[in-house]
Image: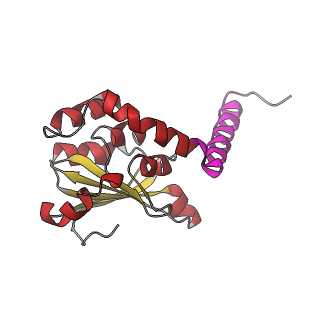
Amino acid sequence: MRLPQGRLLKSRVVTDPREPLAEMLDRSVTGYAVFEPQDSLLLDADGRGVVTFTDGVPVVAYHTGTDRGGPPALADLAVPGPYHVSAFELDAADLAPVHDVEELCVPPGMPAERLAGDPALADSTRRAAPAGRPTAAGAESADDHGAVEAFLEDEEKISAIREQARQEAKQRAAEWGLNDT
């Protein structure tokens, strides 16, 4: 997926992808955000996620590392933070060719649910979506199945989550004075 360079609005590291998603919605930004997960930041792993927006409502998702779009791209991007996020403003006419590719499109609330785990933000995003965009939870549920399957098939991602959970459990056990014996 190729996009023209937009006008940089903000570039920062966030622990929660909710922040940039909410900000794009609140400011009604037409453009895109590039999410670079910690794997890319720390381990030189390939892959960034790109989410495009029209008036703050997500339209397209694409993952550069897996070359997948739509809900599977969100599954590829749903990894523990932090993320380096760069938000860009871009004319709607420049986004139109990408927005016309159905395989790349996501339901409006899906990025908030999949990346941020925020049902309230997902509901706000659905309400802001223009008429004609599928916004009902049922419309998103049809795509959820493929995204969940894609996530579950990614052994590397599951292993990374398990390892992070183990490290957090060990840290909490040490803080609470518990030991393995």
Q: Which residues are magenta?
A: 152-176
Q: How far across and how far down the image is residue 72, in percent?
A: 45, 48
Quarter-of-image position of residue 107: top left
Quarter-of-image position of residue 109: top left
Residue 175 in magenta? yes
Q: Is residue 161 left or right of residue 77?
A: right
| Point 69% across, 39% down: residue | 166
Task: Say if residue 117 shows up in the picture.
Answer: no
| Point 63% across, 44% down: residue | 158
Q: How far across and how far down the image is residue 174, in percent?
A: 71, 34
Q: How far across and how far down the image is residue 93, in percent?
A: 13, 64
| Point 64% across, 51% down: residue | 156
Q: How far across and how far down the image is residue 104, in percent?
A: 34, 54
Q: Is residue 161 left or right of residue 177?
A: left
Q: Is residue 133 left or right of residue 69?
A: left
| Point 24% across, 72% down: residue | 4
Q: Is residue 62 above or below residue 162?
A: below
